[in-house]
Structure formats: structure tokens, C-alpha cells
Image (cartoon, grey):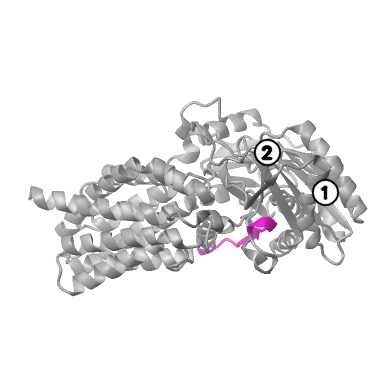
Amino acid sequence: MTRVLGDADAFVPDALRGFARAHEDEISLVDGGVVRANPLEPGKVAVLIGGGSGHYPAFAGYVGSGLAAGAVCGNIFTSPSTAQALRVAHAADAGGGILFTYGRYAGDVIHFGEAERRLRDEGNDARTVLITDDVASAPVEAADERRGIAGIVCVFHIAGAAAERGDPLDEVERLAARANSRTRSHGVAFAGCTLPGADHALFEVPAGQMSIGLGIHGEPGVRDVPLQPAAELAVTLAAPLLEERPHDGRRAAVIVNGLGSVKYEELFVLFGYVVDHLEAQGVEVVEPLCGEFVTSLDMAGVSLTLLWLDDELEELWRAPASAPALRKGRVSAEAPTVRPTAPRGSAAAEPAPAGAAPAPPATPASRRAAEIARRMLVSARDAIAAEADRLGELDAIAGDGDHGIGMTRGLTAAVEAAESADAAIGVRELLQRAGDAWSETAGGTSGALWGAALAEVGLSLGSPEDFTAADVATAVAAAHARVAALGGAEPGDKTMLDAMAPFDETLTERVHAGSGIADALAAAATAARAGAEATSAMSPRRGRARPLAERSIGHPDPGAVSFSIIAAALVGWVADFKGSE
């Protein structure tokens, strides 16, 4: 558990502030993460890494020479927002292009992908290399769907070393992708981790057992087996990595990684047996690492990573690096260039600037709709807050347990943005601001999807002289389409769409049949609840829960449940509103 903290909600900005102060000769704090204290030389590629916090040394600890130019740092186990990624990119950019590289997690893909798109719209050359080293998260025939764990360090260093020597963006991208294609990781957990301020672990491992195939966001493993002595554990960890050994796999960079509570002496014991086993398999170990490199708060667990080297990758792996969490070789010292330090807590503050420009005059109907939207957001926030613990427990079955916290945080930000908006703005501008605030503050997949959904509803409604029930149904359909396109999911994948799709379909059917908006919403909410309940029998095909599909069966999807809760809250609000007229 976390024993040293102030406000649990401020844990990440507090930690980043302290980290930057502890390494102020190397690191500068910016709004959204950290960058090098010494800006890159003009024309060099900016390698940007990132993801949710709770994994130190990842991600901030790998900002430095021969590694990353900056790190985008989201909340605990939650992807950073698009706006955070943009701010870090702008701070780190040296004119040579930007390469985002990070583990393949749905929220990260959505937020960083949107940041890449916006950078390109601005005229910057931005690329992405996803890291997919975790062999337990998908079979070899679906290797491009795997998530990233400790193998991210290999890709960070290969990309960073290539950028440091002055390689152009095309080459940095190629080498990072090659490193990822030749990197494999496998891990086990002995006990779960505990979120800051929480009093229990996200998952439990039975006594005398270990959980194989853990995830670094607090996900349990895919199966439990009896504890093994170090020599046997070394073979267990290495087996799937050796199974995917390339034909030229004679040399490998090796990382034995502690997940948080397995400390150095134990790791050294394991490392010795790992090297014995690899050498017996004809593998030459090159410049290995043993320690904590990608953690999961206080999780008790270990992972093994192999980067199969060829000549060009070995040259880069052996290249110098100097960052707070990784020193290799000798890097020439530079006098730090002091950047302005962001104020305390700013890494998680200030919503995205979208909507900051003066809005066109809103019609009276649009201003009235904006006031209704404000009240609906409050109702939704209160309903989710009341169910946050249950949503977190559902999410912890096959995920990291933060869904209730994230939804509450996002809705609270959306309400604050809506309530602080000028009373003269219309529903389009209000929902855009609320959606931006939700996405910025909550991060993660749900933050990105709900933020986009709110903005799409506002865009569809616009600012007409009057609104009809058909306008509302059209706006919901537009939000549904936007969420489906952004998340890449379909009904049956065990996601939020399994509640959203029947809500949309039923609302449209009832409105077209002549029902009033209150009756149509009530029927749609009932359909959403049934859709959410039906996910209990489904096996997840998307997101973090997919590798733990068996554990998820028998439990509804938390995203679908939270959608149904909000739908029911809106129906209740409409009923109360009608009764007060």
C-alpha cells in the first residue's frame, strides 16, 4: 500500500513535482509530463514516451541523453490525455520530427493517436511505434495486438540512441519498430498492487501460488500455478520467449525486472539462474540489466525481457545513455538550460484549450439546452459517484480497478467546466468544453470515448432555433458512431458499446414511432441496462480484459454498466424536471 501521500487525487502531480526537483539538472516539469532540462539540438528527432503513472522508473525516469526527449505522464494506470501529449510534444520538439512510442494499450492508442493527428495538422512530422512485447497478452499469430511491459525499455533506448546520433525520423522509426519486433517479455506476480489511498490490493494471488502473465496496470495473470524455486522460475519465464526465438537469435539483451516489492537481492538470485539457463540454450547475454525498470506500484512480481540483437541493434543497445533511471557508458556533460517550472499540480490541471475562442452567438433554444445539459451532467456525476466502488470492483476482475475512480474524476471535471462556462454559450460549446475537460482529467480509454461522445452530441445539436426529439436521437446516434470509430469496437466485444448501441437504437425507434422524449429515453435506458447485463456472458475481445477473458465471463463489463447507470440517471432527471414544470 502507499504509505506516503498527501491528497490521493494529487498523488501523480505531487510525485512529478518532487521528481523534477530531485533531478532539476536533468529534468524540467511541463504541463503534462517532463522533458529534458537541456533542449535537443536543432533538427534532432524528439522521441516521446509515456502512459499512465505508477510504473516508475517508467516513464519520467527515461528522459535523458540516449533515451527520450520527453515523457507524457497520465494518472495512475491511466493513459494521459491528448492535450497532455501535445503540450509535451511542443515543449520537446526540435524540428526533426516527433516519434511517439509506448505500450499498446487502448487509451494510450486513442489519446496519443489523436495528438499525432493534430501535430500533423500543424505541419509537424509525427509518427508512432507501438510496443507489443508481452507474450502472455496475445498468441504469436496476433502479436501486433500484444501489450507492452518491461520491453518498452529496449525500444526506448534503441530509438533514443538512434535519435541521439542524429538519425533522421524515418530511420529512428524503422529501428524502433525493428527493436519492438525482436523484443519479448513474460512476467509473474506473487501479490497484487494497491492504488494510492486504497486499503486493499487490486487482486489477490492465492497463498503458495503465483500468477503467470500479469499486466503492469494491476491486471492479474492469466493463470495461477504453485510457487517455483528460482531455477525453475527462470525456465518458466524464459520458455515462451525462447519459443519465439528468431533464426538468428544468438545474442540477446536481457532485463530481469522487479515489479515493485521484489527487491534487489531476490532479483539477483533470479538473474543468475536466468543467465545460466540462457547460456545453456546457446544465448550470449549482452549488457544485461537487473533491477526495477517498469514497476506496478507495490506489486510483488518479476518479469523477464529478451531483445534479440543483430549488429545494428547491438550497436545501439551498447550506446551511452544518461537519465535519472538508467546510466550506460559515458555521456558528455552539458550545462543545464533551466526551463520555467510548472506550478504544483499543473501536470493534471488546466483543460485543453479547445473552445477557448469566442463562440458564435447562441440561440435561446441552444442556451436553454445548455442549461439542461449542465443539470444532466450533475445528475450523471452523482449517480456514478454513488456506484464508483462497485464499478472499480468490476474493473478489477480483469482490469486495473480504476474505472469508477476515472469516471467520477472525468464527470466531476465535465461538471466544473460546464458550470464555469459563460451562461450565454449554447449547448454545442458547453458540451465541447465539458468533453475536453472529461478527456483531459480522466485520461484512459473511457475518458477519451466519453469526451468525444459529449463533444459529438454538442456538435450535432448545434445552435438551431428549436430542438425536437428527433434532434436528440440524431445527436445520440452521432455520438454512438464517433465512439465506435474511435475505439474500434463493435457490439459483442464486451465494451461500453454493448449498452450504447441498444440505447441508440431504441431511442431512435421510439422517437420515429412518435414517442415523446421522456418515454423514448426511459425505453432506451431499459435497453441499455439489458445490454450491460448481457455482457456478463460475453468474452472480451478488446482492451485490457481480453487477455483475462476467462476471469471476465460471468461479470458485466464496467464500461457498459457505467453507461447504463448514466442513462438511468438521465431518465430520473427528466422525470423530476417534468414534475417540477
Determine whether the residue tagged by mark 2 lies in a helix, strand or loop: loop
- Asked if 156 appears above or below 525 in the picture, the reply is above
Q: Which residue is mark 1?
A: 319
Query: Magenta stretch containing residue 130, yes or no?
Result: yes
Query: Magenta stretch containing residue 231, yes or no?
Result: no
Q: Please state, as top left, top right, bottom left or bottom right, where the N terminus lies in the image.
A: top right
Residue 363 visible within the image: no
| Mark 1 neighbour density, 10 Å: few (under 14) some (14–19) many (20 or more) | many
Query: Which label sits in the foreground, 2 or 1?
Result: 2
Where residue 499 sits in the image (x, y, percent)?
36, 61
Residue range (magenta): 120-137
Q: Is residue 557 left or right of residue 212?
A: left
Q: Which residue is mark 2?
A: 208
Residue 42 marker: none
Q: Is residue 205 left or right of residue 79?
A: right
Of residues 420 and 331, the one nearer the viewer is 420
- Asked if 354 appears above or below 181 in the picture, the reply is above
User: Sequence-wise, which precedes: disc 2 or disc 1?
Assistant: 2
Where residue 484 sits in the image (x, y, percent)?
43, 66
Q: CA distance from mark 2 to mark 1?
A: 42 Å
- Looking at the image, the residue that sits furthest to the left is 581
Q: Amino acid at mark 1?
A: Ala
